[in-house]
Amino acid sequence: MDNFDMSVFDKKKELQKALNYTLEHYRPHDPGSYLYNKIFEFKFSQKFSEDFIELLYVTLSAWNMNSRGAKLSDFSVFSESIKEHKSDFKKLEHQKIQDLEKNKEIIKDLFDNLKVVDEGKPPLVTFSKTLHFILPDLIAPIDRRYTLRFFYGKNTDTCFRSKDKQFEVFWRIETEFSKFAQKQKDLNSYVDKNGWNRSIPKIMDNAVIGFISPTVEREKAEQKKKEKEKKEKLKTIQASHK
């Protein structure tokens, strides 16, 4: 099977197994973890200060938002855009991921208008992480390597065909998380205020990471093996022509 959905975590033992894998193997000594926990030291009312927005920008960079095809907008543009949309964020301050559907219009407006990436760059991943840092109880972060691989299989390029397509993908994934949170009433029991499991949306993201990571690592190893074999074959051909 190439792609999955949240039903793989219907059994608590599978959810716990995936979370344990993430805890043990995912960025154990990475500065991104330290910065992520610093984010949570700020109250919502402080999240439009220059200090928080600088931390947000640095954390996004640490989470690879200036690589793999992503490119953050200039800090001045990024900062001004966050501040300009303070009223929209304020409307979402107390919303939980279980409340996702009723907030679609505001979230779509933010997706269309927040300037978190350079013009022409795909906003999907950066947008999800930006909103997660500001609204950690409402939005789960999305990335290409784990989240998109889990929900869409190996060919994740199709997720980035257009900005409308990216919002469709974003909304489908967040809706999957929302429905799972509505069904699983005890997700709060997994919240850890000093680690990766800081909120219910991040718990679900971590479950996805833990579940799909072995597959991602296996595919990476297979790709390296193929590349090595290809190089060795090329060397053999070149040697035979000398």
Image: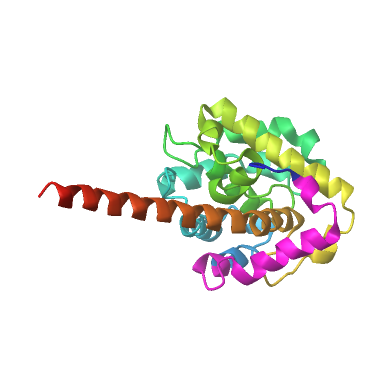
Residue at the image position 82 percent from the left and 49 percent from the top: 181
Residue at the image position 47 percent from the left and 60 percent from the top: 62
| Percent coordinates x, y for residue 154 in the rendering | 55, 41
User: With 226 as the anchor, is 37 left or right in this view?
Assistant: right
User: With 212 as the anchor, is 154 left or right in this view?
Assistant: left
Q: Is residue 109 visible?
A: no
Residue at the image position 48 percent from the left and 36 percent from the top: 122
Q: How many marks?
A: 0
Main secondary-structure element of the magenta-colored stretch: helix
| Percent coordinates x, y for residue 65 in the rendering | 47, 50
State the residue in front, 86 or 100.
Answer: 100
User: Residues in magenta?
Assistant: 6-34
Let me know if residue 20 is in the magenta part.
yes
State the residue in front, 48 or 211.
Answer: 211
State the residue in front, 126 or 14.
Answer: 14
Q: Is residue 161 visible?
A: yes
Residue 168 sits in quarter: top right
Above or below, 148 relative to 136: above
Above or below, 59 relative to 110: below
| Percent coordinates x, y for residue 173 in the rendering | 69, 40
| Percent coordinates x, y for residue 31 in the rendering | 50, 69
Residue at the image position 56 percent from the left and 39 percent from the top: 124
Let me know if residue 22 is in the magenta part.
yes
User: With 241 as the anchor, is 108 left or right in this view?
Assistant: right
State the residue in front, 171 or 134.
Answer: 171
Residue 202 sits in quarter: bottom right
